[in-house]
Image (spheres, rainbow, N blue to C red):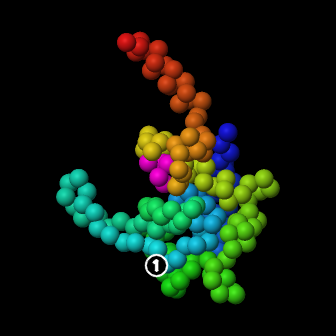
Amino acid sequence: MPRPTPEPVYAAALRSRDEVALLGIVLAGMCGLRRGELARCKREHVVESIELHGDGRPVRIYELRVIGKGGHERYVPLPPMLARLMLERPPGWIFPSSHGGHLTPAHLAKRIARQLPEGYTTHNLRHPCGTVALIHSKDLRAVQELLGHAKPETTAIYTQVSSERVRAAVMHAAAEPAA
């Protein structure tokens, strides 16, 4: 069963005074990144491009190049304010270590977990990202790509379906008899 971080818990975590943890919380919660993916983020991984909207207007978009499990690469859309925040950082690791390189995934996860109630982890922040993405896109494959899952069955575990949506599905099925 999915165990997404509840909205009030996420909102409280967003008030963190630990800037490192806060950026990790936002990236995990908005973009669904794993702790290892967070730790390996570089400013240079933020990609800016121009796309044309359906009406032909050019729109600036940002994506984050993410190196996921098994070295698989994917591009995750970034909200403009988050992209700007990352681009304001110095070149190199978004989460640098004082020893050179980047923070370890375990250390970054501990800093994030300190901002969450007991029982919640960085990983729990991926679940609401997947759930919200599925609600708005209605496309399990798109959410699978966003979260970097190899199988849609894994994505289904991450996405919480409200009882209202299940009831609505039954009501639609009842209103339209099967052929």
Regarding residue 42, the answer to whether it shows in the image is yes
Question: In the rendered view, does 8 fall on the left or right side of 51?
Answer: right
Instruction: Find numbered disc 1 in the image and state the secondary structure of the residue it sits on.
Output: helix
Q: Is residue 104 one of those drawn in magenta?
A: no
Picture layout, residue 80 above or below residue 129: below
Residue 153 horizontal/vertical position (percent): 56, 40
Picture layout, residue 110 above or below residue 145: below
Q: Which amino acid does label 1 sit on?
A: Glu
Foreground pick, 9 / 142: 142
Residue 138 horizontal/vertical position (percent): 44, 40
Question: In the rendered view, does 91 fall on the left or right side of 21?
Answer: left
Picture layout, residue 25 above or below residue 150: below
**Quadrant location of the C terminus in the rendered image:** top left
Residue at mark 1: 44
Residue 116 horizontal/vertical position (percent): 73, 59
Which of the 4 image quarters holds residue 103? bottom right
| Residue at (49% x, 78% y) in the render | 43
| Residue at (68% x, 45% y) in the render | 3
Q: Residue furthest left?
A: 56
Dominant secondary structure of the magenta stretch?
Answer: helix
Q: Is residue 143 one of those drawn in magenta?
A: yes
**Quadrant location of the N terminus in the rendered image:** top right
| Residue at (19% x, 58% y) in the render | 56
Which of the 4 image quarters holds residue 29? bottom right
Foreground pick, 47 / 116: 47
Give the residues in magenta: 142-146
